Image (spheres, coloured by chain):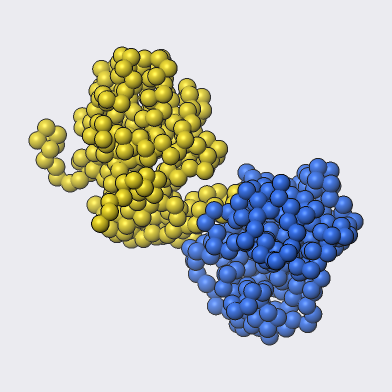
Amino acid sequence: MSDYAHPEVLVSIDWLKQNLDKPGVRIVEVDVDPKLYAAGHIPGAVGFDWTTQLQDQVNRDILSKEGFEALLRKAGIKNSDTVVIYGDASNWFAAYGFWLFKIYGHKEVRLLNGGRAAWLNAPGAPLTPDVKPVTPSDYKVSKVDTSLRAFAPDVLGASKTKKEALVDVRSPDEYTGKVIAPPGMSETAQRGGHVPGATSIPWSTAVNTETGYFKSPDELRSIYLEQKKLDPKKATIAYCRIGERSSHTWFVLTYLLGFPKVRNYDGSWTEYGNLIGAPIEKP
Amino acid sequence: MDHSARVYDDITEMLPNEENPSPLVRLHRLVPQNGSELWAKLEWLNPFGSVKDRAAWEMVRDLEERGELGPGHPGRGLVEPTSGNTGISLAALAAVRGYPMRAVVPSKVPEEKKVLLRVLGADVDVVKDALCPLPGSEDGTIGLAKTYAKAQGHKYAMPNQYENRHNVDAHIRTTGPEIWRQTGGRVSHVFTSLGTCGTVTGLATFLKAKKPSVKVVAVQPSAGHDVPGLRNVSELDVSKLFDPALIDEILEVDFELAYVRARDLARAEGLLAGPSSGLIFEGARRVAERAPVECGVLIFCDNVFKYTSNMLKHLPELAVES
């Protein structure tokens, strides 16, 4: 069996168990449900709340460079640290955290394959409610990689020129416009449907529903390349509703399948579906 | 203890068993008039108000017998993922025994149940229901409860009704023998719903051993339903107690009918049955319409008091103008 394009970005439960106390390894938990961290987390892990800590609290935007620096300084994370991120729902929001770390140029970032559920169910994998005191660091962002992020004009251009592929990772009902958002979501849009030309590949296609682990390299290739006909050489933009599910697919395409240029459109449907005059396809 | 005088030393003595069964009440007006006999087993008359009293009691006693709860672990209590009824039964038992209790419930659970849990002194965590399918994450409530049990084991033991065989054994030990005795062995059909599957698996195991011809019919709400505590077969992967080989038929009923039939049962039979009972009744009625049911027993899990807000949501004509 062949390997992922960049297997080094994934760590296993066993690797993490053996490296829990290793200097230079820091663990970050990012969950859909922030209650989980407080109930119990991997010893030494710091918890980031995606709604209050990973987004700008005034403007609709990702956390600013200064905000990111302040967050990591307070968490005692150093520029040289290897950061292992994990979370619930098969690393759904952990992947969003990974994307943010990469935008702000952190060199060594990993995802725990299987995420929080795999750790929770692994024998001998400890959890604690205790938050370990940390010494603040002098974290500094030296470069911001904006090439990982797509904006509305990029998406409109991609849809029109077809020079970049578009992947809609929302549920089939959101893609077809049967619903505008999953039930109970407060963030929504004026219109339902999808960006013309976008291919529907729900984000969770990439994970094994039984275990939460990423599917094997061969399975991923079969789905994304053979069945869905994505071109690995073509620049690609992934989007969802608010940009978190699509960061999961951004991770899969970039690191597991090795697409050279993938961008996450974090404005996603809550921006696009509200834009005056934006063309929408609705079967 | 004297069940005839109904004088008890503490509330746990009222828990049901063959000598002290929950009542079996015959349905009349709503039953197809073809010789069918349908009997409702009124589980809300158990001391804490639902069929879950049985599993909760069995699971707590098991934890106590194994020394996981009690004098060996001062201050240790219970944590459980629940859509309400198991939590209420466990919280009441925890109250009697002096254990702390934490219930992890999905946000869809009706307000009445959340308040009841608080009335019983439980800490309650509300977990947002799946925003989207969450593969590999288990049910959100199960993940959070397991986290408490693993990270704070000194504070919490987790019965885990989705995996605990005592949830099944409770029905082999109590509900099954009760039905056998109450029907004098005439029982021909059992109608129940699917949740943790403790009831269906336990009842089928006991009754089919006694009488292989007993038909076990599970009634499930249509997909996307809003009937707390029940699961559609597509959602059953969370329960390790589901054994399809024991079930003769799975009937799917439009979930809105759960509320309509709960209302009908109150108006035509004087039974204050909850929506899951309404759904089970509709399934039994359909089976009886196809061919006479000799002696069908319907497990009516709980009463309607905990669902007044849901009843109002689904049957707006119930609103009283002030």
Occupied quadrant, residue A7 = bottom right
Q: Colour of chain B?
A: yellow
Judge whether residue B280 can be spotted in this image. yes
Figure quadrant of residue A91: bottom right
Residue at figure coordinates x 11%, y 32% from the top left:
B4
Camera-side residue of B41 and A27: B41
Chain appearing in blue on the rendered image: A
For residue A97, side relative to residue B192 (left or right): right
Relative horizontal placement of residue A169, taking residue B104 as reference (left or right): right
The one nearer the camera, B116 or A242, is A242
Q: In this view of the protein, can residue A126 be seen by the observer? A: no
| Image spot of residue A272 (x, y percent) | 70, 63
Residue B322's x, y, as percent? Answer: 25, 57
Apparent side of residue B4 relative to residue B120 in the rendered image (left or right): left
Taking depth in this image into account, of B69 and A142 the one nearest to the observer is A142
User: Residue sitting at 77 percent across and 50 percent down?
Assistant: A199
Q: Tell me where residue A45 appears, x and y as whole percent.
A: 59, 68
